[in-house]
Structures are given as structure tokens and as C-alpha cells.
Image (tube, rainbow, N blue to C red):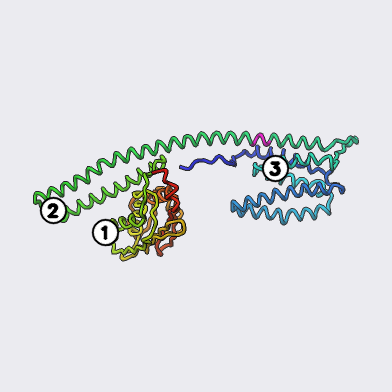
Amino acid sequence: MKKLKKGHFNFPVKPLETIFWLAIISVTFYLNLSPQVFKKNNTSYIIIFVSIFLIFILHKIYTLIKLKDKKSLYLSLFSLVIVLPFLMIAANASKVAVNYYFPALVSVSMAMLLILDSRMHVIIIILLCLFFLGEAFFGIYVSTSGGVKMPMTFFRMYSLTLLAIFTYYLYSKENVIRREVDILNERLKEFDTLKSDFLANVSHELRTPLTSIRNAVFLLKSNKDKTGGKVTLADDELMRIIISNVDRQSHLIDEVLDLAKIERGAFQMPRSLVSIKEVVDEVLKSLSIEASEKSIRIIADIDPHLPKIYGSDDQLAEVYTNLLHNAIKYNHENGKVYVHIKLSGNYIESVVRDTGIGISHEDVKKLFDRFKRLEAQDVGQREGVGLGLVIVKEIIELHGGKIWVESKIKEGSKFVFTLPLDLRIMDRGRL
């Protein structure tokens, strides 16, 4: 179960709440873009505000590019390339546009950007502080009808106060969400522990009767042989089916137990120097009968000079067994399975390729997800519950390696994974 992240939260807000803050912040910016600013001798100040607007738009575009949100990206580009130049042209032709419309548009746009991306509030406050410091240089005043001049510093301070309130509002709201996420993560952790313990206990309870059934079948067959009793073909087939199903269920229980260990963080096993070639040779012998039943030829090309690595021979054997078993099971009659293992730089690279049914691009994305079992009509009913490749990936990553898949429908599949040679030094302390 994935842990909730405690980064930036885009929390939902009520419509009235949004309208309220949009109005407040728009007024705040408009006070800083008042008609007094647009005097001829204050063109530098105009450039500052236009630059800020461009910075916000460009920042939003950069964010949208990273998020690959094309619709919003095109809208931002439109406002930057079309709307802004048009307004700049209109500003030269209309006093109303210069003194009111353009400042209002920039104010509302900046307010919307601030609300949509609350991380911008710190930048805005810093910029307004710079404006405050630059006020004495530009010497801007607002004249009342009675001829009283009020320094724009008053309006700057008022603006900063409003933005400070909004910043505190965002900060307090995010803190509430952070606390809620912490509580939820603790509950998720407890739930995961209970689930893992339950899986482990149930699996152990199931293993005992299955072992008894298997032993009873072998004992029944052995007693018939000793007493000279005849075992008909039908009896022999029934016993074979029983043993086969018991073995299948035992394998499933082993996978569930492994999953429980993974979730508890107890999947590490004692490690020693392991010869990859010897491990693969043993796996190939164990799967030879299964391959011959489908007339599948396994072609192995293993570098005889591979260095040994520190690892778990049982876990690595499980990796190769699972990948080769799948290559056989999802292959065609008279198909082929290729195994290539070689030294590639500081890694041992293993490739298991088959000539089977292949996997679609969409299904490749789900291969290493828990309990995701892919269906295909031409190979019959699938066995298992989709844990094998999850465990394979976990084992490889515990050994410091990586695994990936290349496959197309009706063109077979290729599983590639690497194991670092540095593991020989890196994991000595775990032995």
C-alpha cells in the first residue's frame, strides 16, 4: 500500500472562498498597478510589473510542461503570445486601457496564478517588499480630491498585510492536511502490519493440511506397490492430479508468505558467494520435464567465466525458475526459450526470451503489480494470482539490480535483469 506524500497539497476550496480571495488579492495587486504608476516618467515601474506578470506566466508554462498538461499549456501560451501584446498595443491607443483595463487584467491574472499555485505567495511577498523599498526612488503619491497627497507606501503596506493574511491562511490549511496525512499514514502502516500477519498465519495453517494430503497420496501409492495391489491407469491419473494441485497450491502459499515477508521488511535471507551459472544449470534441470511436455527447446548461452557475487542462491533460483517457467507456460508447442547470461560492465546481465504469445504494451505496465493476472485466450486458464513477478522484482531489487520487459503480441517476450558486481563488497555486512 502506497504511503501518502507530505509535499505540496492542492486542497479543494469552496467557490465562495475562492471568489473572496480572488477579489482581495486582485484589489491588492490593483493598488500596486494604480493609474498613478502609469505616468510618463514612471515607465520603469510599468516594466517591473509587466516583467512580474511574464515571470508568473512563464513559471506556469514551465510547470505545465513538466506535468504535460497540454490544454492548460496552450491556454497560457495564448495569453502570453496573443493577449498580452494586443493589450500593450491597446494601451497606446486608449487612456482607459492604460489606466484601468490593463492594470485590472494583470491584477486578476496574478491573483488567479497565486490561488492556483499557492507556492507563489512567498515570491510575491518578496517582490512587493522590493517594490516597497523602491517606492522612495520612484516617489509615487496618490492625490485626493482635496489636494492631499498620500504616499503609496501606505498602500504597499496594506497590500503586504493582505498577502500576509493569505499566506497564513494557506500555511494553516496545509498544516491541517499534513496532520491528517500523518494520522492516515500511521493507520495505513498498522493496517499493512495486520494484513501481513494475517496472510502469514493463514498461509501456515493451509500449508499443514496440504503437506498431509501430499504425504498421504504418496503413502497410498507406496502401500499398493508393496502389497502387490494393482494401480489402474485411472487411479494413477487421479493421484497425479492430486499431487499436481497440491504442489500448485503449495507454490501459491509460498508466494503469499514471500509477499507477507516483503511487506514486513523481513524478506532478506542469508547471503554467500553464489555462482550464477550453477544456479541456472540447476533450474534448467528442474524444468526440463516441463519443457519436454510441450516440446519446447531451451537454448542456454551462459558465460563460463562469470564472477561469483554475494547473494541468496535460493532467492536467485526463484527468480530464474519463475521467469523460465513463464517462458515455457506462455509459449507455443515446439517453441523455443533462450537464456543469455553475460558480464556487462559492472553488472551480470541475464536475458530470458521466448517465442510465445507476447504481451501488449498496456499489459507490460501491469506486469509487476500485485494480483494483476493477464489473460490470453490461446493458452487456457491462468494459474496463480499474479504474485510471481512481484516477488521476482523484489528479489532483484534487494540484490541491487533492475528488471525490465520488452514484448509485443505474437512476437514473444524478453525479460532482462541486471545484478551489480559491487554487491560482492556492498553486502558483506549482511552475511
Sort mark 2 into few (<14), some (14-19) or many (20+) by Cα contacts within 10 Å.
few
| Quadrant for the C terminus in the image | top left
The answer to whether any part of residue 152 appears in the image is yes
User: In terms of image quadrants, where is residue 377?
Assistant: bottom left
Tell me the CA gap for discs 2 and 3: 85 Å
The answer to whether any part of residue 385 appears in the image is no
Closest to the observer: 299 or 178?
299
Q: Which residues are magenta?
A: 166-170
Residue bearing mark 3: 123
Predominant SS along the magenta part: helix
Viewer-nearest of discs 2 and 1: 1
Residue bearing mark 1: 289
Going by the numbered disc 1, the residue's amino acid type is Ile
- Whether pointer 2 and pointer 1 mark residues with C-beta atoms closer than 8 Å, the reply is no
Residue positioned most to the right: 147
Going by the numbered disc 2, the residue's amino acid type is Val
Give the left or right position of residue 308, taking residue 21 as reference: left
Q: Which mark is residue 231?
A: 2
